[in-house]
Image (cartoon, rainbow, N blue to C red):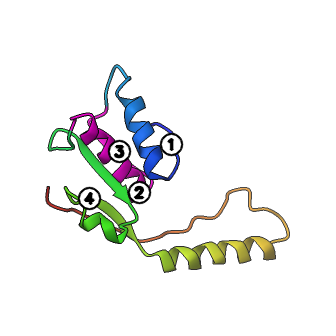
Amino acid sequence: MMEGDHALEGGQRTFTKSRGLKARPTAILCSNDMTAIGVMRESYGKKIPISSERSLIGFDNIHISQYILPPLTTIEMSQAQLGRLAFQALLTDVRRELPNPKGTEYVLKTSFVLRDR
């Protein structure tokens, strides 16, 4: 696991860092599609294309993900549902007199969007 920010430039930096590892990753799962696009851009710039030997997956299915080349495989979730869950969590926390030591689990449905290369 490597840490980066949630921007195109963060994906570029993280890809460059990953090239310095002894055991280079064969798959990269990014926290959002913009980071994945940054990884893709840097990999192609270094002539190391994303292919069947190197997998890349984004997360959030932004509109442009289907139009870049190659199209980005991603995980889709409802932004509206995420907002509702976040608001529900905030209300629950504000109404609670004592913190819940076990925490609270919220489930957000996602779907895998496989795009052809």
In the rendered image, residue 58, in percent from the top left (x then y), is placed at: 35, 56
In the rendered image, residue 57, in percent from the top left (x then y), is placed at: 31, 53
Q: Residues within 10 Å of mark 2 (few under 14, many from 20)?
A: many
In the rendered image, residue 112, in percent from the top left (x then y), is placed at: 29, 64
Mark before the other along the chain sequence, 2 or 1: 1
Above or below, comparing residue 84 to residue 3 in the picture: below
Q: Residue at x 48, y 75 (%)?
A: 79
Q: Residue at x 26, y 58 (%)?
A: 72
Estimate the spatial distance between the alpha carbons at disc 2 and disc 3, rounded to whole Å: 9 Å
Query: Residue at label 4?
Result: 73
What label does residue 39 carry, if any? 3
Secondary structure type for disc 3: helix
Q: Residues within 10 Å of mark 1 (few under 14, many from 20)?
A: some
The residue most toward the top is 22
Name the amino acid, label 1.
Answer: Gly
Query: Residue at label 1?
Result: 4
Nearest to the observer: residue 87 or residue 67: 67
Query: Residue at label 2?
Result: 34
Estimate the spatial distance between the alpha carbons at disc 2 and disc 1, rounded to whole Å: 12 Å
Residue depth check, mark 2 versus mark 4: number of the one nearer the observer? 2
Check residue 80 for magenta coloring. Answer: no
Could you tell whether 25 is left or right of 90 in the image? left
Q: Residues within 10 Å of mark 3 (few under 14, many from 20)?
A: many
Estimate the spatial distance between the alpha carbons at disc 3 and disc 4, rounded to whole Å: 13 Å
Nearest to the observer: residue 21 or residue 111: 21
Estimate the spatial distance between the alpha carbons at disc 2 and disc 4, rounded to whole Å: 12 Å
